[in-house]
Structure formats: C-alpha cells, structure tokens
Image (tube, rainbow, N blue to C red):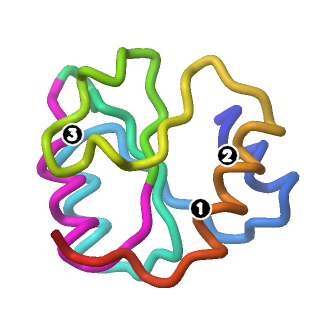
Amino acid sequence: MMIEDMLADLGYKSVSSAATVDKALALIATQAFDVAMLDVNLNGKDSHPVAEALSSRGIRFFYATGNTAQSLREGHAGRPLLRKPFRQEDLTAILGRLQGQGPSSPR
C-alpha cells in the first residue's frame, strides 16, 4: 500500500497490484499497462513467468527487490533495478527514465 500511495502522490490514477504470479499473469492478459514494477519474488514464487509475459507484450518494466541482482534471470538482468527499501525520489527517477522510452522490445 505504501507504493500505491507513492504512485498516487506522483499523479498515477490507475494502479493494479498482484501478490502472486497467477494474479499478475491474469492482469497482464486482461489489462493494458504503461509500465510495471516487478518483485523478483511473488508470494514465495519466482516472478520470471511474469517478466516473460511483460516482455513478450512490449510492456516496460523494472524490478523492485531486496534481493541481489544475481537473482535476476538471464534475458532480464539488464532491466532497471530499484533496491528495497527505496525512497519516493528513487521511484520517481526510475519511472521517469522508463516513460521516456518507447515500448519495450520483446526478447
């Protein structure tokens, strides 16, 4: 909820969240996203299937994690990384960087 509050403070009007891989995949299949924030671990499961789904749909995303960068999967290790805990300024910077880019290329 803290992240949702940060995003609301930044002016984002529509924010969806998913605590599980299945919920995230269902959201990706049914909604359009400008950008996504993805934790490496969703409710104890590796989020790699979510990263693949986002990438295949050309949705820009970044990782937000307390884990090491070594946790990131091959093919996505170059994605921007926001280390937890983070400040609103850090979130603002990474979102600004991603929104300044065109759609992500499927890998």
Give the spatial CA distance, label 3 vs label 2.
20 Å
The kind of secondary structure element at disc 2 is: helix
Give the mark nearest the N terminus, 2 or 1.
2
- Residue 15 appears at what percent x and percent y? 59, 61
| Other-residue count near label 1 (Cα within 10 Å), few / some / many at <14 / 14–19 / ≥20 | few
In the rendered image, the quadrant that contains the N terminus is top right
Quadrant housing residue 26: bottom left
Three-letter code, disc 3: Ser
For the residue labelled by badge 1, is the local secondary structure a helix, a strand or a loop? Answer: loop
User: Do tag 2 and tag 1 residues touch (Cβ < 8 Å)?
Assistant: yes
Q: Residue at x 20, y 44 (%)?
A: 21
Which residue sits at x=70%, y=43%? 91
Residue drawn where x is 37% and y is 75% of the image: 104
Query: Is the Cβ of the residue at disc 3 closer than 8 Å to that at disc 2?
Result: no
Numbered range of the magenta stretch = 45-61
In the rendered structure, find residue 4 and report the number of the disc placed on it.
2
Of mark 3 and mark 1, the one earlier in the sequence is 1
Q: Earlier in the sequence, mark 3 or mark 2?
A: 2
Instruction: Check disc 1 and report the residue beneath it.
Output: 15
Residue bearing mark 3: 47
13 left or right of 42?
Answer: right
Which picture quadrant has residue 53? bottom left
